Image (cartoon, rainbow, N blue to C red):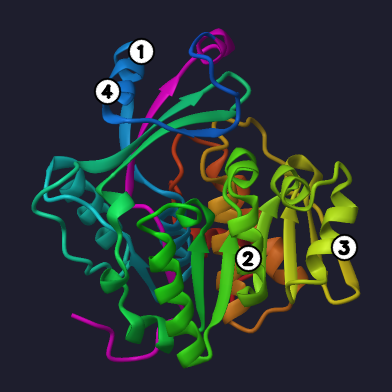
């Protein structure tokens, strides 16, 4: 089944189920992991890590999928492109994302690896460290991409985690081809500082095709090779029409041509879990963008949606984001 009318947004990324567990900092360091980053692991290592943790909570996740759910909660019409297996976690993912109002019709795999999962360790400061087993999500193929859906959309949003992988690099190209054919704006998230370090060349090669780039300060600096976030923004703004760099409680920087904006973060009483903060920021920004808002208003809505998700466990909104946006005077 395909949309019969124009969509606002299509997101493309790994379909994952997040397994969330609270841990002290010593657990992260004891596992030899770098706090605040994502590490790819195989099924065996994923099982080993999971068995060493306290009881955990399983919720549907995946960066681009989180953005899709957030934008749908704000009122956008959204499609998601990702791959699951016909298994328990795959059915959980399908049920959750469709219940959130997101169009998802990629056929589940009937064989091969299991549905991907990410063990998300949340330390007392709310920071998350992820060990991700991509599973069948790593096999998202060009033929899984609904090119007509992307060509109809205002924006296609690509998850940086797809970049630099053997099976999904051609999938990115299929999405770019569809966007070019339909005049669809391409947005890209850099996803993770360590991922940028590992795949700097591949991500940089995408920039000429990108009209809207999302990154946090660490990712932007890593891609450019500088420790100065303002220098990184200036360099990236020469390659992308709009660059949005989040800085946690420091708000975000938006660069459009020669224009620079500083948008404040929304204060949060208690940071519980930063998982999904960047994903939900992008959801708010993209929803406002496709409704015709300017970059400052879009970033303000992104700050509102990011603040909501870091106030509770998990990377999906706990309530209706459209109502939250209306209360903030940012309904679009």
Q: Which residues are magenta?
A: 1-29
Residue at 71% from the left image edge and 63% from the top image edge = 299
- Secondary structure beneath label 4: helix
Tags 3 and 2 in contact by the CB under 8 Å rule? no
Q: Residue at x 52, y 85 (%)?
A: 184
**Which residue carries the number 2 mark?**
205
Comparing 287 with 63, the one in front is 63
- Label 3: which residue? 234
Q: Are marks 3 and 1 in contact (CB under 8 Å)?
A: no
Residue 135: x and y, percent?
Answer: 27, 42
- Is the residue marked by circle 1 packed among few (<14), some (14-19), or many (20+) residues within 10 Å? few
Residue depth check, mark 2 versus mark 1: number of the one nearer the observer:
2
Q: Which residue is mark 4?
A: 44
Going from N to C along the chain, the mark reached first, 4 or 3, is 4
Alpha-carbon neighbours of circle 3 within 10 Å: few (<14), some, or many (≥20)? some
How much space separates mark 4 and mark 2, taking CA atoms? 33 Å
**Mark 3 to mark 1 CA distance (whole Å):** 44 Å
Q: CA distance from mark 1 to mark 4?
A: 18 Å
The reply to whether residue 19 is in sight is yes
- Residues marked 4 and 2 touching at CB (< 8 Å): no
The answer to which of marks 2 and 1 sits earlier in the sequence is 1
- The picture places residue 160, in percent across and down from the top left corner, at 53, 55
The reply to whether the magenta stretch includes residue 14 is: yes
* Placement of 263 over or under 19, stated as above or below: below
Q: CA distance from mark 4 to mark 3?
A: 43 Å
Vertical side of 181 occupied by 119: above or below: above
């Amino acid at each position: 089944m395909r949309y019969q009318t124009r969509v606002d947004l299509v997101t493309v990324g790994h379909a994952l189920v997040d397994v969330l567990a609270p841990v002290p900092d010593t657990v992260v360091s004891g596992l030899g992991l770098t706090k605040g980053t994502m590490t790819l692991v195989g099924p065996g290592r994923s099982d080993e890590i999971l068995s060493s943790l306290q009881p955990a909570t399983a919720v549907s996740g995946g960066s681009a999928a989180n953005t899709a759910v957030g934008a749908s909660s704000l009122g956008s019409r959204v499609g998601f492109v990702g791959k699951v297996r016909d298994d328990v976690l795959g059915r959980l993912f399908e049920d959750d994302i469709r219940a959130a109002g997101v169009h998802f019709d990629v056929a589940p795999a009937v064989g091969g690896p299991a549905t991907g999962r990410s063990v998300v360790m949340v330390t007392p400061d709310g920071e998350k460290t992820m060990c991700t087993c991509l599973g069948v999500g790593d096999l998202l193929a060009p033929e899984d991409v609904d090119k007509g859906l992307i060509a109809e959309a205002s924006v296609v949003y690509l998850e940086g985690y797809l970049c630099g992988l053997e099976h999904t690099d051609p999938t990115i190209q299929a999405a770019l081809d569809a966007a070019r054919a339909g005049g669809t704006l391409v947005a890209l998230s850099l996803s993770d500082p360590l991922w940028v370090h590992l795949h700097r060349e591949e991500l940089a090669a995408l920039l000429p095709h990108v009209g809207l780039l999302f990154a946090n300060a660490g990712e932007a600096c890593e891609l450019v090779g500088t420790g100065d976030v303002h220098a990184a923004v200036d360099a990236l703004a020469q390659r992308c029409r709009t660059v949005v760099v989040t800085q946690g409680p420091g708000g975000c920087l938006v660069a459009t041509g020669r224009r620079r904006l500083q948008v404040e973060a929304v204060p949060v009483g208690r940071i519980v879990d930063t998982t999904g903060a960047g994903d939900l920021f992008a959801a708010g920004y993209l929803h406002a963008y496709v409704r015709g808002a300017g970059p400052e208003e879009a970033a303000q809505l992104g700050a509102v949606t990011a603040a909501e998700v870091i106030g509770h466990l998990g990377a999906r909104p706990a309530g209706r984001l459209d109502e939250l946006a209306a209360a903030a005077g940012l309904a679009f």
